[in-house]
Amino acid sequence: MNEQYPVFDEKGKIVCQICGSSFQFISPQHLKKHNVTTAQYKNRFPDLPLTNKEFAVKSKFTKKDKALFEAEEKAEPILEEDDPVVEELDLREELKKTVRKLDPMQSMKKRILEHLRIYFSNIEQDYMVREYDLSKRLLFEFVTDFCDPVLRVAFQFPDTFWHNQEAAIDPNKNFKMEQAGWKIIEIKSAAPSLEKIDDAIKNF
């Protein structure tokens, strides 16, 4: 596949071909934000490196380092902040860095949010929808699981997240939103797969 961005930026950093961000190396933690592994990234961009030349020399990327890199990919998803100070750190030290793990619910929300952004660039999580009448009187306000306020599309996961308890308080929640011009996409699953979300979007 042809690269979508320059391979290196003006400072010589390697550029992620999925999002266009620049790094000294493209780590497994960063790729998890796109729900892809290093192997999948390499399959998509087989001719592109994962590090810039300067960092590859500094890190002395050996077979032992490669094993650590691959082992890190198999670990449970973790949240890592992209820190520009890491430029001078050894690759092995970066991979060993201890970071805070996400709880299962937050991990699921993050995974879904990143996937929905492939289709909806303005998607937001836990978005409060408010509608008013002509006299500025509040008609309703509902929290949506995920929402694109520009396209007025709301994703609801009635068997997954707590916001949907509102349905018991106001069973006409979806009807009211649809009457106000919102498109509601419901995905009923306690642990929705990305494939199930894709199918719902295809039928949108």
Image: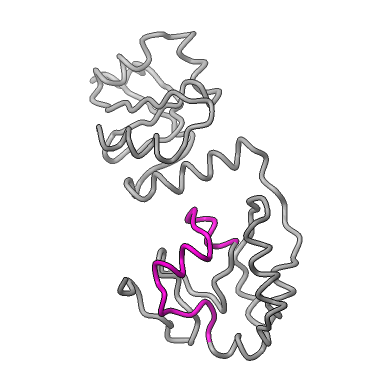
Q: Is residue 137 left or right of residue 74?
A: left
Q: Quarter of the image containing the N terminus?
A: bottom left
Q: Is residue 74 depicted above or below 170 in this figure?
A: below
- Front residue of 89/96: it is 96
- Identified at 47% across, 56% down, the residue is 34
Residue 130 is situated, as x and y percent measured from the top left of the image, at: 37, 26
- Identified at 60% across, 86% down, the residue is 56
- Identified at 43% across, 9% down, the residue is 170
Q: Is residue 9 depicted above or below 129 in this figure?
A: below
158 in magenta: no
49 in magenta: yes
- Front residue of 126/202: it is 202
- Front residue of 126/79: it is 79
Q: Quadrant of residue 75?
A: bottom right
Residue 35 is situated, as x and y percent measured from the top left of the image, at: 49, 53
Start-end of magenta stretch: 29-52
Residue 138 is situated, as x and y percent measured from the top left of the image, at: 36, 18
- Identified at 54% across, 80% down, the residue is 51
Q: Is residue 37 left or right of residue 83?
A: left
Q: Quarter of the image containing the C terminus?
A: top left
